[in-house]
Amino acid sequence: MRFLTTVAVASLAFSGAWLGVVEAKSVSGDRVLVLVPKVEAAKLYSQFLDSLTGRGFDISVRAATNTSVALQVDGVRTYDHAVVLSPESKKLGANLSVRDFVSFVDDGGNLILTASSELSELGRKLAARFGVEYEKRGTAVIDHVAHLRPINDTSDHTLVAASPPKTAVPVLSKQFVRPQSNPVYFKGIAHKYEPSNPMLISVLTGSRATYSAPIGSDANEGTISLSGKALGLVSVFQTRNNARVAFSGSAALFSDALLSQEGSANKQFTTDISQWVLQEKSVLRETAHRHYLASTGERPEHYRISNEIVYEIDLSVYHDDTWHPYNAKDVQFEAIMLDPYIRATLNSTESTDPKTTATYHGDIKLPDRYGTFTFRVNYKRTGYSNVDVKDTVGIWPLRHDEYPRFLSAAYPYYISSLVMAVGFLALCAAWMWSAEPKTKRTPKQKSN
């Protein structure tokens, strides 16, 4: 057995010996750990592993029972990505626990986790940490309408033909948006997912005739637990730190048997999933941002209330092995002090590097409120990595000699005071220069 293991590892190493001259296309690293039940089982997934090798990844195939396998050593990741193709193994590597995998993802590692009808408890607990709940052990996805139909009559209704939803474009290729696209063949276990979870994206679900039930049981209300679009087959998850995780209820989805199936889209589907998880596409980044006074073009140490400023940010998206300008109409700027005082949509403008970046520009008038503000662009869109840019800025009140001499809002008070003064002076003038009317005095009559 030891000899066979050594030969298998040597053959895989030889097939990827030219990796030194190939640059990995992932923005997060090229070290990939692949866990299989036995090293000999890697040949069942040779096409998928060869596609990773051809894309420049440094693959390390290890048996799930290999006790020398560790995701982190002294808090430092030993791999950038992990692919688990051994769903039935009760133990993985050097007694890797759910906490080890979660710590690996929290540290920026990416993970592809496959399952089957005999999924181990370790895989269930790990998926539950990301909001994915697999069906009971011994169940399978069944579809009596959409399934693989061979030439003979021995069709397998647990080998269902599924179509990705149209909303998964950032994860999948545009070819899956076409109404007549080839199906993706799936054989495995279903899972529940929460559609309202903004971090979880379902990229493959069941059809109206698809349901989940124990293997060999009759389809009735007592045995069917999930059905239709609520039945998840493949879902992906993106954490707040932009690490990515994929949950596939079928390890066979990545096998040579289904990748080479005529009329299937499995090869393109698994390529798209792995490219997204390993951060070869739909990766956003902020290359630069700046803000300055609109009047002078300079950035002062602090701003004054009601200053007019300019805010600009440069965004790029990674796909097809290079960075491209990211074009959108919903990039927003916020000025926050506990609550947002300003929220404005930035407009696309001319970029200094139009081949790789797109520049977004906004003319902002600061609030009439002084304090410590946060200038922030918090851009989160389904399927793309998050961009969160913050600047802490002080906004001071005006100096005593910076206030305007007259306030336009006080003009009514100015006029009323002036009218009152004029009226008072007119009253005084009328009182001072007015004379009493002269009346003739009548003589007094003498008494007899």
Image (tube, rainbow, N blue to C red):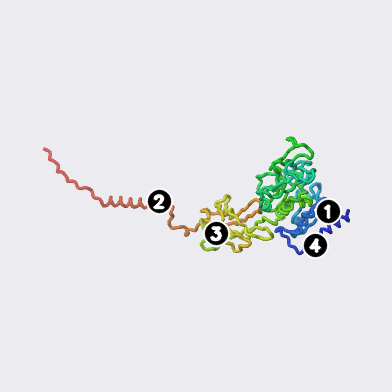
Compute the Cα span from label 2 to label 1: 87 Å
Count all numbered tags in the image, as a single digit.
Answer: 4
Q: Are marks 2 and 3 in contact (CB under 8 Å)?
A: no
Which residue was labeled with disc 3? 310
Q: Residue at x 73, y 42 (%)?
A: 145
Which residue was labeled with disc 1? 39
142 shown above or below 14: above
Seen in the image, is 315 located left or right of residue 295? right
Compute the Cα span from label 3 to label 4: 52 Å
Specify which label sits upstream in the sequence, 2 or 4. 4
Pointer 1: residues within 10 angstroms few (<14), some, or many (20+)?
A: many
* Closer-to-camera residue (298/256): 256
Seen in the image, is 259 located left or right of residue 384? right
Residue 26 place in picture, x, y as percent: 71, 58
Q: Residue furthest front?
A: 151
Q: Residue furthest left?
A: 448
Q: Residue at x 62, y 60 (%)?
A: 357
Compute the Cα span from label 3 to label 1: 58 Å
Q: Are marks 3 and 4 in contact (CB under 8 Å)?
A: no
Compute the Cα span from label 2 to label 4: 84 Å
What is the number of the mark on residue 412?
2
Specify which label sits upstream in the sequence, 2 or 3. 3
Pointer 4: residues within 10 angstroms few (<14), some, or many (20+)?
A: few
Which residue was labeled with disc 4? 17
Which callout, 2 or 1, points to the residue nearer the camera? Answer: 1
Residue 81 place in picture, x, y as percent: 74, 55
Name which residue type carries label 1. Val
Name which residue type carries label 2. Pro
Residue 167 place in picture, x, y as percent: 65, 49
* Closer-to-camera residue (424/317): 317
